[in-house]
Amino acid sequence: MNFDTALLLGLSIGPVIYIIITLWRGSAKSFGAFHYADRGIAPSDFIDSTIMYALQVAVISLFATWGFINGLWAMLVPIFWGIGYLIIRALILSGRLDDIILGRMVGTIHHFISQQNRYRYVAVVAALITLLGIAGPAMFEAHFVADLVSRSVNPETVNGEYYLALFVAFLFVSGIYMIYSGFIGVVGTDKIQLAIGYACFSAVFALLIAALSASKSSEAFYIGVICLAFAGIVFISKFVVDLVLRHTDVISLVSTGIGVAAFAIAAYVAFTAVNDSDSSALSFSAFISENFRDRFPLISILSLAIANGLYQLVDVGHWQRLLAVQTTSDDLPKARRTLAVSTLAVGIYSPLTWAIAVMFGITLRYLLPEGDPWVIVSELMTYFDAGGFIGSIQALLFVAALTAIMFSTIDSLISGVAFTVHNDILLQFSDKFRSVTWAKIVTAFLLIGMFYYYLFMRNKTGAQFDAILYFSWSCQIALVPAVISTFVRPSSGPVIVASMIAGCAAATWPFIQGNPAAVFEVSPTFALAASAIVFIVLDSAQRIMSRA
């Protein structure tokens, strides 16, 4: 099998399976069925859908770069991400999300804020800001894989001669199954995407560790053992959750089991190489020490903590999944426990998959020490191309993994923002838009509109993917004070709107200064600070005036 054939197979496996699954599940027949599966998602299915949603191509590409540059310091980001799930779990157990879980509030998080503050246009403004926030991550996934594969076919061509065609093809395929079956299709394909994405990526990574053991046997052994520990915890947590929920998801258990087996074999191969090596072995403490390399600046750590630790509060996809859970008042205590256990498991599982991606970046630094960290994944494809048959197999598995994860992110984010635009904007003007036909039209137009918006953002940022992603996430972080106030002490609509707009505007400061490279370092902090300050000042002034 040659390299180009491997790329084609890697691209094709997932989409064919997803379309078959979608056709089997059938077409969405109503507004509710299209946007939140008519609240028919079993609580036990919530975890698998959410896990795959949290494993993104952006994660692999970002951590391949950050792991290469910053080493183990990049582990801070998965830790912050896990804290976000603990916050959601606390809200579930506190009963503050009961209205959403029971379906008393059928709408997005923006609609929930709007209802609590009794100001309908809060939902409209929040939805528009979220639209800006999701466009970057959703389109980045398709762009990254299309560009990667295109460059692999013809490395001499800027953006690759097949780049735009592949980009559009990915959106077309995802559009087919999203528009046909709606949210039930998104959740239905998540399990398969999880299996393909996680299992194939683990297999490729394990092969890279085995290859590294030929020259860096001690380093390869430590990487293999650390990844085996992470993968083992992922598998055990999934197994325990299935026992607690009295539910067995064979597909997820098999895929996570493949991860354990792959890293166990890689660690064994590396251990054998250590024993056969004539050179003195590197100690584990020395390995850890040399991989605490370039530390993030303190302002960057703060921004990373804000962007990752608070993101779950404003993530429309996560709220959409909570709304889709099937439960009743009689089942509420059980549903709370189920969702709390699931969210805790995802809070363990998802950060650990990110941690494995950090180790992937560290491995690439050892394997390709002269590589450019900002295009290191493209250079890895060149490495595969030079590897003969084994390299082609690795390329097939790697592209299959990236494609599976990419489709999961596209469909989840587009589904979430389509629900947002439909429910929080169109329905605010007329109830005649409440139909499955309009739901499909909104989804189709969003795919096209966000495609062009992404190309515009890419041009403005100089194609710096971390700037695109963190500006997008910063826009959504501007909603955090509004969400928190909804659960603690609702304010007035004008105060909420002013705080959201202020936060979103503050996130653009690096662009105003002509320094898009600083976006990931400061925009999340600026967005949260501006939004919080405006909210506190205006809310306090309003309460003082109301008492006068």
Image (spheres, grey):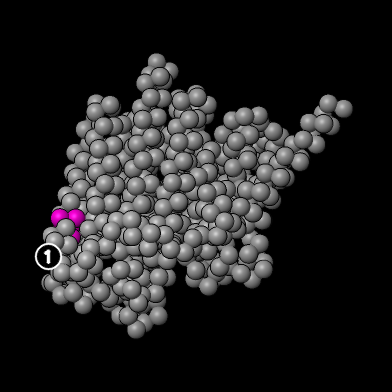
Q: Is residue 38 visible?
A: no
Asked which quadrant contains residue 429, the reply is top right
Q: Residue at x 77, y 35 (%)?
A: 540
| Picture coordinates of residue 395, whole percent (x, y) | 23, 67
Q: Nearer the viewer, residue 419 or 347?
A: 347
Q: Residue at x 52, y 49 (%)?
A: 305
Q: Residues within 10 Å of mark 1 (few under 14, many from 20)?
A: few
| Picture coordinates of residue 330, whole percent (x, y) | 39, 15
- Most extreme residue toward the bottom is 156
Residue that carries the numbered disc 1 in the rendered image: 276
For the C terminus, which image quadrant? Answer: top right
**Majority secondary structure in the magenta region:** helix
Q: Nearer the viewer, residue 204 or 41?
A: 204
For the N terminus, which image quadrant? Answer: bottom left
Q: Is residue 65 above or below residue 303?
A: below
| Picture coordinates of residue 16, whole percent (x, y) | 23, 56
Start-end of magenta stretch: 266-270
